[in-house]
Image (cartoon, rainbow, N blue to C red):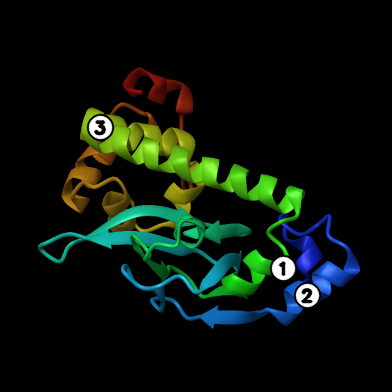
Amino acid sequence: MYRARDIFLFKHLSDQQLEKIQQISFIKELKRGEILFWEGERPDYLYILLDGTIRVFKTDNKGNEITLHYFYPINMIAEVANFENIPYPASAEAETDSIVLAIDYDKFKRELLSDPEISFNIIKSLSDKIRILNDFIVQNMMMDAVTRVAKFLYEHEDLFHQLKHNKIASLLNITPETFSRILKKFKQQEIIEKNGKELVIHKDKLKNYI
């Protein structure tokens, strides 16, 4: 059972306000591979990821999926669509079994969004989304494949150990074969070394590529 007070948006709210959150929301459990929402759908709910991993992606004209970002708890998912009252600009899929809090957005906006601390935390979340978008644009327009992989390993070593290589390649918008070749190159240069069953990343050596 989730506690609304454990969510960063609501930790300062009164008991009465927390009860209101409970009344206008419900828990949505997703199995791995299940879609939370499709690109183009109307955003009726404000989604907050409580557990698991959510992948946000777009589909190009050829039907290829382009991964934009992975989200981890506790995080709002695609809240820009709610606040701008626009269809979802991308789709969201459960990368692992996940638990999401779904809040009736119209009621939330009418009854709780006027709270200044909630508004401030939402602004911070939106700023994070702008940073993510900017990183995605810079990565795909200004960085070559080697630099993309180096930057990913430097900033997201945890994801490197958690995600399959084809997922990381999709996130970096390169082919799995290219990703494998770059990893092989980094291993030959002893940037990545095997220690027992685990791979160790020497981040100091990665700085030469970033």
- Provide residue 98's location: percent of width, then percent of height: 54, 73
Q: CA distance from mark 1 to mark 3?
A: 49 Å
Count numbered badges in the picture. Answer: 3
Give the residue type that dot 2 points to: Lys
Q: Which mark is residue 111?
A: 1
Q: Earlier in the sequence, mark 1 or mark 3?
A: 1
List the residue tagged with mark 3. 146
Q: Of the residues tagged 1 and 3, which is closer to the observer? A: 1
- Near mark 1 (Cα within 10 A), the count class, few <14, some 14-19 or many ≥20, is few
Q: Earlier in the sequence, mark 1 or mark 2?
A: 2
Q: Of the residues tagged 1 and 2, which is closer to the observer? A: 1
Give the residue type that dot 3 points to: Val
Residue positioned most to the top: 208
Q: Of the residues tagged 3 and 2, which is closer to the observer? A: 2
Give the residue type that dot 1 points to: Glu
Question: Contact, CB < 8 Å: mark 1 with mark 3?
Answer: no
Residue positioned most to the left: 62
The residue under the point 45% across, 41% down is: 130
- Near mark 2 (Cα within 10 A), the count class, few <14, some 14-19 or many ≥20, is some
Q: Is residue 148 left or right of residue 29?
A: left
The residue under the point 31% across, 69% down is: 40
**Whether residue 93 is visible:** yes
Q: Secondary structure at mark 3?
A: helix
Q: Is residue 78 left or right of residue 167?
A: right
Q: Is residue 161 left or right of residue 63?
A: right
